[in-house]
Amino acid sequence: MPAPEEADPGTDSVRADRTVLDARDISRALTRISHELLERNKGATDLVLLGLHTRGVPLARRIAERITAVEGAPVAVGELDVTMYRDDLRSQPTRRAHKTALPPGGIDKKVVVLVDDVLFSGRTIRAALDALADLGRPSAVRLAVLVDRGHRELPIRADHVGKNLPSALAERVSVRLSEVDGSDEVTIS
Ligand SMILES: O=P(O)(O)OC[C@H]1O[C@H](OP(=O)(O)OP(=O)(O)O)[C@H](O)[C@@H]1O
Ligand SMILES: O=c1cc[nH]c(=O)[nH]1
């Protein structure tokens, strides 16, 4: 009989997803990122948080709530759709487009923080940078992600990371958020 901690190859293929962050872990990671952003930016002035669809949008709003609570003043937050800027449009033409909504002050001369749930190949962020270039000229663009799972295909890195999660290429990291999925959890399968 194998010891409990030993992997049983017979059950590996049917093993359920493994939870890597629960709701409290996600909350703590977002709180830390919010403080990091404030420290790096020396406050929330000229800061614009842009969430990438789908789950980057609620994450950006959660970070904005935390920053507002600390600073006592609202921070600009919006949402960015990168669908038309993707480099896989030909191979995956059926992606659903979302809306882009910038805060009233726009992004010119602002420090824009792109917010997404997972950083993997970096291609979504590449598309986001192209989308931004059509919308204005920020003074700086930074990247905050809940999970960095590695396997970059482009020279892109995150400035603020909730959790670095080494993963096999064939694995899938799934972020679930209450606003979209009914509960908060990050799993790897
Ligand atoms: O670094 P990359 O290789 O681009 O992968 C990361 C992107 O993949 C996921 O989005 P997905 O395209 O699955 O769409 P969704 O957010 O609407 O689920 C995730 O939300 C990131 O945006
Ligand atoms: O594992 C992955 C890869 C890309 N995007 C995700 O959300 N998860």
Image: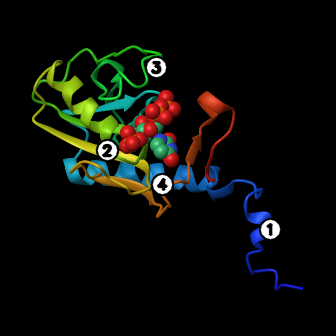
Provide the residue designation for mark 1.
10
Contact (Cβ within 8 Å) of mark 4 with mark 3: no
Q: Earlier in the sequence, mark 4 or mark 2?
A: 4
CA distance separating discs 4 and 1: 35 Å
Query: How far from the left and from the top, in percent, is residue 108?
Result: 12, 24
Q: Earlier in the sequence, mark 1 or mark 2?
A: 1
* Amino acid on which the number 4 mark rests in the picture: Ala
Disc 4 packing (10 Å; few <14; some 14–19; many ≥20): many
- Nearer the observer: mark 1 or 2; the answer is 1
Q: Earlier in the sequence, mark 3 or mark 1?
A: 1
Q: Could one spot residue 177 in this view of the protein?
A: yes
Query: How far from the left and from the top, in percent, is residue 47?
Result: 23, 35
Q: Is residue 159 left or right of residue 120?
A: left
Number of marks in the rendered image: 4
Provide the residue designation for mark 2.
122
Label 1: state its secondary structure. Answer: helix
- Nearer the observer: mark 3 or 1; the answer is 1
The quarter of the picture where residue 130 lies is top left
CA distance separating discs 4 and 3: 29 Å
Provide the residue designation for mark 4.
29
Label 2: state its secondary structure. Answer: loop
